[in-house]
Image (cartoon, rainbow, N blue to C red):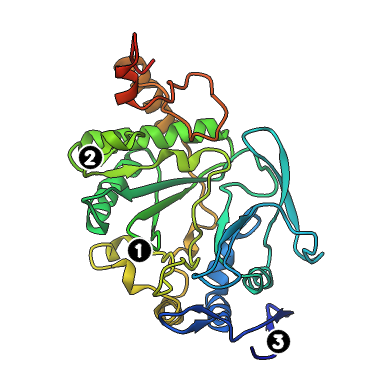
Amino acid sequence: MGDALELTIGGRAVRLSHPEKVYFPERGYTKLDVARYFEAVQDGALRAVRDRPTTLQRFVDGIGGEAFYQKRAPRDLPDWIPTARISFPSGRPADEMCPTEPAAILWAVNRGCLTFHPWPVRSADTDRPDELRIDLDPQPGTDFADAVRAAHQLRAVLEEFGMRGWPKTSGGRGLHVFVPIRPRWTFVEVRHAVIAVGRELERRMPDQVTTAWWKEERGQRVFVDFNQMARDRTIASAYSVRPFPHAPVSAPLRWEELDTARPEHFDIVTMRARYAELGDVHADMDGQAFDLDAALESAARDERERGLGDLPYPPEHPKMAGEPKRVQPSRAKAEPGGGEG
């Protein structure tokens, strides 16, 4: 391995050890290649995580090695990187790193971080999200093109609810749409808003979109993963590198690009060139903050008029008030007195 390097970013020096360590064997991309990528997109990458408690997905031996999620700030976190205290669904607290300058991103890259998973909150109030996140997840038999078709209709739904979304690739087959919101509502309320948006999208595209939590009910449709808005669930940030052989990234897009964009178009090499030409195409998210009133009114109407209440939480989440039983429908029907409850 080569000697350690010192990179200066934002006026701060960051040490990069073992810069020649190969992280992506198929392409030969090294740790230094990843660091140079984040250096090139630093303003956009920081915008996506700034002031947010952030979980690090680390690959200290590259994508072929063992990966793990680091939620709690390590003991050797530099004093210039602040932390924010979050509470897990169990009620247990933790302090997570909370980047405020691009050097924090390179510091994490030096520790093997490829993918950043910021909470949808800011350090000033870690119990009230300021970002509504919608994950369009293609199920078996569907692909990115199906997610794009759903996203176009989602854009119209959001606009009717008085919101504007910003789309990005997941880095895999799916699409994410983020909406900056006023930090007025709890995690439970924001999740209800996502469910309402998903149900309205499902009504408009019943053969292409589903909000069914149980995989056996989804069919060949795009799943609106509403539980990505549950407390302690996070989505890869814009510009994060994903652990696949060609080193793809989660690429911010403009709406007019959706029909021609493909996930494989965006990796740590092509994104550097794109960023040099266009900059951060999501930069105008800053300073925006939409209301959830219309979406929450739709959620209340769904329950009042259609009998559509809450949906199951993730299995590791404590049982929530009003939540249906977490029993797979086929199992529930097989049990005596079966039913979903």
Q: Residue at x 27, y 58 (%)?
A: 144
Read off the residue under disc 2: 219
The image shows residue 265 at horizontal and vertical percentages of: 32, 73
Q: Residue at x 56, y 62 (%)?
A: 67
Within-10-Å neighbours for mark 3: few <14, some 14–19, many 20+: few
Assign a secondary structure to mark 1. loop
Disc 3 marks which amino acid?
Ala
Q: Which comes sooner in the sequence, label 1 or label 2?
A: 2
Disc 1 marks which amino acid?
Arg
Disc 2 marks which amino acid?
Gly
The image shows residue 92 at horizontal and vertical percentages of: 71, 37
Which dot, 1 or 2, sits closer to the camera?
A: 2
Read off the residue under disc 3: 4
Q: Which comes sooner in the sequence, label 3 or label 2?
A: 3
Q: CA distance from mark 3 to mark 2?
A: 50 Å
The image shows residue 186 at horizontal and vertical percentages of: 58, 33
Read off the residue under disc 1: 254
126 versus 265 height, above or below? above
Give the quarter of the image for residue 118: bottom right
Q: Which comes sooner in the sequence, label 1 or label 3?
A: 3
Q: Residue at x 46, y 66 (%)?
A: 243
Q: CA distance from mark 1 to mark 3?
A: 38 Å
